[in-house]
Amino acid sequence: MCQELKLIIEVDGSSHNQLDVRIKDLKRQMELEDVGFTVLRFTDEEVLENMDDVKRVISDTLVDLVTRESSL
């Protein structure tokens, strides 16, 4: 979590494929977004198999957040 930019990055394991866990995750994410956080979610597989894509998404999001913050 980056408090300054209100960014949360989560890596979800296979237990997050269960419907009850997905619903809980979505509810929590919506609550965090309602108070201004950006939540990025990645699966374990994405991190292990596509790290370049994960890093690109994080980097692009950081640029967007810093740009948005500097324009305020």
Image: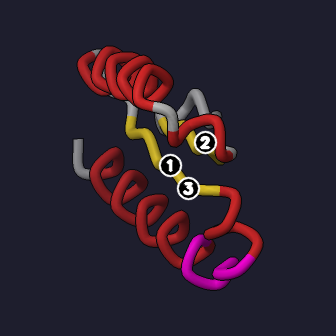
Tell me which residue sits at (55%, 32%) in the image. 4
The chosen color scheme is secondary structure
Q: Secondary structure at mark 2?
A: strand
Q: Label 3 vs label 2: CA separation?
A: 6 Å
Count of residue discs:
3
For this view, does 67 lie left or right of residue 62?
left
Instruction: Give me the disc on residue 22.
Output: none
Horizontal relation, residue 41 to residue 23: left or right:
right
Percent from the top left, x then y, of residue 37? 39, 30
Disc number for residue 10: 2
Out of 57 and 70, give the one closest to the viewer: 57
Quadrant location of the N terminus? top right
The secondary structure that most of the magenta stretch takes on is helix
Marks 2 and 3: in contact by CB < 8 Å?
Answer: yes
Rendered image quadrant of residue 52: bottom right
Which is more toward the observer, 65 or 18?
18
Region of the chain picked out in magenta, as a range: 49-54
Which residue was labeled with disc 3?
42
Q: Amino acid at mark 3?
A: Phe
Residue beneath disc 1: 41
**Mark 1: which secondary structure?**
strand
Depth order, front residue of 28/9:
28
How far apart are the two marked residues, 3 and 1, measured between alpha carbons?
Answer: 4 Å
Residue beneath the point at 38% across and 39% down:
38
Residue drawn 43% across and 40% down? 39
| Amino acid type for the residue under numbered disc 1 | Arg
